[in-house]
Image (cartoon, helix red, strand yellow):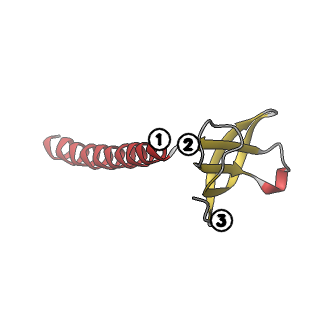
Amino acid sequence: MCTYHTERVEVAGSGKGPNGWFPLRLACICFDHPQHAPAEHTLNIDFLNPEQGPSARVAVELDEEAARALVRAIQAALDAARSGSTAARRLGRSAARTT
């Protein structure tokens, strides 16, 4: 179902478009009819840099199951990185105490 509800969030990162890499500044997310994906409705994400014009855009269309799996995978990767950096700090403190 189309809600016409769009979430916009400022982002900092990079995307690769037809002219190469460009800095990302904005992500727009909605659940709507796709332009290309073979589904009735998809989660549509546009990563863009409005200052650089329409070629500075990366579009993604995911079915609901894939979108939810992506959210879980992103959260797991961020959690693992946080745990890893916490473990690395603990190892660093332990190593400092033994020297």
Of 47 and 3, nearer the camera is 3
Q: Position of residue 32 (x, y in %)?
A: 63, 54
Instruction: Using the numbered discs, state the Cα–Cα distance from disc 3 to disc 2 in whole angstroms.
Output: 16 Å
- Give the Cα separation between the discs numbered 1 and 3: 20 Å
Which element type, helix, strand or loop, lies under badge 3?
loop
Viewport quadrant of the N terminus: bottom right
| Mark 3 / mark 2, whichever is N-terminal | 3
Residue 85: image x %, image y %?
32, 46
Residues at circles 2 and 1 in contact by the CB criterion of under 8 Å = yes
The location of residue 30, given as percent across then percent down, is 61, 58
Q: Quadrant of the C terminus?
A: top left
Location of residue 22 (image quadrant)? top right
Q: Label for residue 62?
A: 2
Distance of label 2 from label 1 (alpha carbons): 6 Å
**Drawn side of residue 94 relative to residue 57, left or right:** left
According to the picture, the residue beneath numbered tag 3 turns out to be 4
What residue is rendered at 52% in x and 43% in y? 63
Q: In the depicted view, which residue is nearer to us: 6 or 56?
A: 6
Residue 66 — which label? 1
Q: Amino acid at mark 3?
A: Tyr
Q: In the image, what residue occupies the spot 70% across and 42% down?
A: 58
User: In terms of secondary structure, where does tag 1 sit?
Assistant: helix
Give the left or right position of residue 19, taking residue 43 as reference: right
**Mark 1 Cα within 10 Å, few/some/many (few <14, many 20+)?**
few
Q: Amino acid at mark 2?
A: Leu
Of 43 and 89, the residue lying toward us: 43
Tell me, yes or no, whether the two marked residues, 3 and 2, touch with CB atoms within 8 Å. no
Q: Is residue 17 above or below residue 26?
A: above
Q: Quadrant location of residue 15? A: top right
Q: Residue at 75% across / 52% down in the picture? A: 49
Q: Residue at x 83, y 42 (%)?
A: 55
Residue 10 — which label? none
